[in-house]
Image: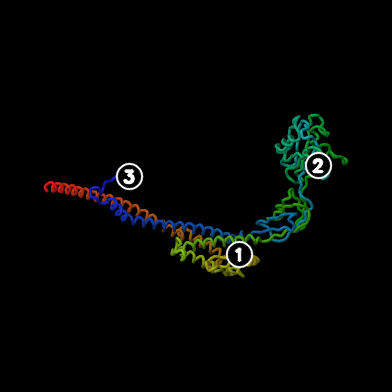
Amino acid sequence: MASITSTGLGSGLNVEDIVSKLVSLEKQPITELQTRTDTLKTQISAYGKIQSAFSAMRDAASKLTTPSSWAALTATSSDTTMATVTASTGSGAGSYAISVANLAAAQSLSSKAYSSTAAVGAGSLTIELGQWSADDSTFTGKAGTSPVSVTIGAGDNLSTVRDKINSSGAGVLASVVTDASGSRLVIRSKDTGIENGFRITAADADGNNTDSDGLSALAYDATANTGGSTPPGMTRNIAAVNASLSINGMSISSATNNIESAVDGLSINLLKKGDLTVTVGQDKDAVKKLVTDFVTSYNSLMTMLRDNTKYDDSSKSAGALQGDSTAVGLQGQLRNITAAGSTLGGSFSRLADIGLNIGANGLITVDNAKLTSAMGKISDVKQLFMGIDNANPDNNGIAQRWRKLADQVMGVDGAITTRTNGLQTRVTANNKRTDELTDRAAAYEKRVRAQYTALDTQMAKLNDMSSYVSKITSMLG
């Protein structure tokens, strides 16, 4: 709660105004100190942003010094409607002639037509995964699997049977397909390949498990096909088969259409039959992107340093670090590394040789056509960036030196860390001094106010005496 004072009433002096101005003068050093502290905090913030930009530049340079970055491969298909391809580490550069005789397929069965609401019969269906022989005379169960039985109720229709099969985990997928003839139950293997065929055995509540009535109409056993006759039950529309192909003349059989292990590091996704050529080579576009990504991060860092250290004549304003020797020194170190080049890059000794041109402002511009052309000698580009000169570290690849500089300046004793710590120490000292000056100003105000209060009291007494004397004089006169 604000205090009420009558100081000045006795003397007629504007004591409050006098005290306020005296105290304001006493607090002037505090204001100046707080202004200097705010400037220091702005500089600390600027160095924080510069450190973040240095870290981003360091990460981009590190990618250019990582062997795996230069080992990236790409694969192209001569006919992407026939097969798509991807290459990873381990692929061998070169061409592969591929001939696809047939694609892997899942076994698929369909039932006779039913009314969508008609009951299909009661009992159970047993589904077993396995492989049919070439002439369908035998069926061999798939290793590691067991037959799965599905109980069908007397009132179950096709939709109910579909849902029960799909929830059974039998390794098959069921659906209901409806056309002008009615609804059919379609069952196919969940996975492609000859080992993922299946047979269905019915335990029909009507007592006949092999006719075309009741639940037995949903059974399937190819071995019942004797003398070319059609077995009772469901119809096989597609047989389970493996993909059959050759790669450079070597025959390959695969349960799926995604061929992963035939060629190390090469994944081939078959789409249709026919012949094609797959070419595997170094992924020059990926390397080029690493280079341009680095240029972006480098330019961002240099722009930040420039903006914080420049003086704008037109606006008469200075950057937060204008005249800061540490920030100016960092600019110089970056420029020196970028301009120095390396003799390790074979036909390329400077960044300009591969289309990275350094402007007067220190920023790098990319000549896209020249950089693309340089990728034709990618081993030389690699050495320019990541080569190691054991005899002369100053001749190391440019990215090696960029990364080293970033590690140094951001380290515990690095330029950015040391400078930031120094600025923070000054902020702490200023805050302490501000507290001391604030306490001194409060004590000064108390002392001055007491002095003027005492003066006011004395002057009030003198005024009272003067008034009294005036009255006596008037009475005597």
Which secondary structure, mark 2?
strand
Assess whether mark 3 and mark 1 are in contact (beta carbons under 8 angstroms). no
Q: Residue furthest front?
A: 477
Mark 2 or 1: the one toward you:
2
Disc 3 to disc 2, C-alpha distance: 97 Å
Q: Where residue 253 is drawn, which disc sits there?
A: none
Task: Label 3, secondary structure: give it.
Answer: loop
Look at mark 1 in the image and give the residue it sits on.
Answer: 382
Quadrant, the N terminus: top left
Q: Amino acid at mark 3?
A: Ala
Residue 254 position in % (x across, y down): 74, 50
In x, y percent, where is residue 74?
Answer: 67, 58
Circle 2 packing at 10 Å, graded few (<14), some (14-19), many (20+), is: many
Q: Examine the image and state in which quarter residue 290 appears.
A: bottom right
113 to 56, vertically: above or below:
above
Relative placement, left or right, of 385 versus 23 is: right
* Residue wearing tag 2: 236
Residue under the point 83% across and 34% down: 212
Q: Residues within 10 Å of mark 3 (few under 14, many from 20)?
A: few
The image shows residue 188 at horizontal and vertical percentages of: 76, 42
Mark 3 lies on residue: 2
Camera-side residue of 104 and 37: 37
* Number of on-image labels: 3
Q: Furthest residue to the left?
A: 476
What's the amino acid at mark 1?
Lys
Type of the residue with mark 2: Arg
Would you place residue 174 above or below residue 455 in this image? above
State how far apart marks 2 and 1 are (Cα).
Answer: 58 Å
Q: Is residue 227 left or right of residue 452?
A: right
Give 443 or 191, whichever is nearer the viewer. Answer: 443
Looking at the image, is mark 1 or mark 3 earlier in the sequence? 3
Which is nearer the N-term, disc 3 or disc 2? 3
